[in-house]
Image: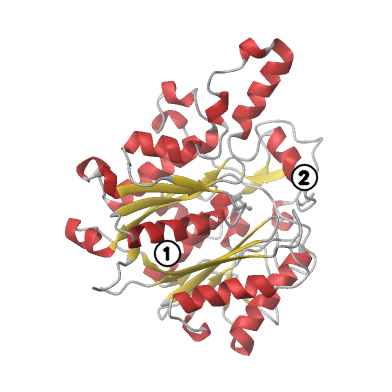
Amino acid sequence: MSPRRAVITGLGVVAPTGIGVTGHWEATLAGECRISPVRDFDASALPVRLAGQVDGFEPAEFVENRLAVQTDRWTWLALAATQLGFVDAALDPAKEDPFQLSVVTASASGGNAFGQREIQALWQEGPRQVSAYQSIGWFYAASSGQISIRHKLKGACGVLVADAAGAVEALASARRQIGRGLAAVVTGGTEAPLSPYALACQTSQGTLSGETDPARAYRPFAGDATGHVPGEGGAILVVEELAHARRRGAPQVYAEVAGTASTHDAFHVTDAAPDHTQLARAIRLALERAGAGPGDIGAVFADGAGVPALDRLEAAALREVFGARGVPVAVPKTMTGRLCSGGAALDLAWAAQALSTGIIPPSVNLAGRDDLDLVTGPREAPGLTAALVVARGAGGFNSAAVLRRFDA
């Protein structure tokens, strides 16, 4: 019996670059930087003043009021992205066996604004003013749970917590579930880590940029990089077993999930190891599991920390694996900022679109380098057959995924 193949048939994007896969892709190819001053509260007391924010998102279009009061913005974004992903895949979960459908998302931040509001109510007005939904509104698994309830997804469901590497971990879990017999898995992640409490937590890591010019605030691999800019949003992917997608007449297959791998630095509670050994190992393992060699990879979607020391480690890992031949390196999240777990999910969506269109998306506000082939404008790549997504999380998480172009 041939192995069950996992393919991406739907993309649901709710990100600074747009709501819906079409608008998002158009903004991406236009190289539109969507980083701007924090607008929902006064951030003047914080060391970070800029963020990637989702414009034009109307929660009422995706979330009924009864549910909205029980949940945080990050769950609203996840519900919206899931709905958009199902529409893009032309998959109606109500017509499927619910025990053959599953959801596994990633979360690094949780329901920050919801939690902050309830903590303030506790201290200002007392415990009787704390919402009954506090225990579930902020919880990391809230989005997976609400997606499962709304669409009656009764297969194995869960959440992965690995900071910015989480969405690759979630994709790996989805692929395993497909291999064990499920028909389709909703996977990816969204985040909304822009409340005062959330930003205060992030500033403690010392990796946020204090720049006030959006064109200079997040410039990974630049010699004068000053850190990264946070952002909200992400992507939800519909991953299906290939035969199931064919039977129901899926309108497109963006890419096949060919191989994934994860390693851990086991070095420090927040800091990465001072060498790139485990990062390079994750990349090599993903290639090996995909049955691919370095020469098969036509584009790398880099983690792009924006912190010089971390960028040097990633560049060293890429040089070790790909050698002098090099490989085109894209950091399209320079348009959105780093979205915690939503960032790797969006990179996976970008990689899938690159494979299906033959265009590598651009990195903005960056110049070329002698030691990396940075993609600084949309690059035609008609021969692109495989792409690598690299993601790292605070505390030493390293994850990599190989997506392959699908040829029927």
Q: Which label sits on residue 203?
A: 2
Viewer can see residue 256 = yes
Residue 142 screen position, x and y as percent? 50, 36
- In the displayed image of the protein, which residue is found farthest to the bottom? 324
Vertical placement of residue 137 versus 257, above or below: above
The CA span between labels 2 and 1 is: 32 Å
Secondary structure found at label 2: helix
Residue 287 screen position, x and y as percent? 50, 77
What residue do we see at 54% from left, 50% from top? 342
* Kind of residue at disc 1: Ala
Position of the N terminus, as image quadrant, is bottom left
Quarter holding residue 263: bottom right
Label 1: few (<14), some or many (≥20) within 10 Å? many
Residue 332 screen position, x and y as percent? 57, 62
Snapshot colouring: secondary structure
Q: Which label sits on residue 303?
A: none
In the figure, is residue 389 to the left or right of 353?
right
In the figure, is residue 58 to the left or right of 83?
right
Q: Which one is earlier in the sequence, the residue at label 2 or at label 1?
A: 2
- For disc 1, the marked residue is 352
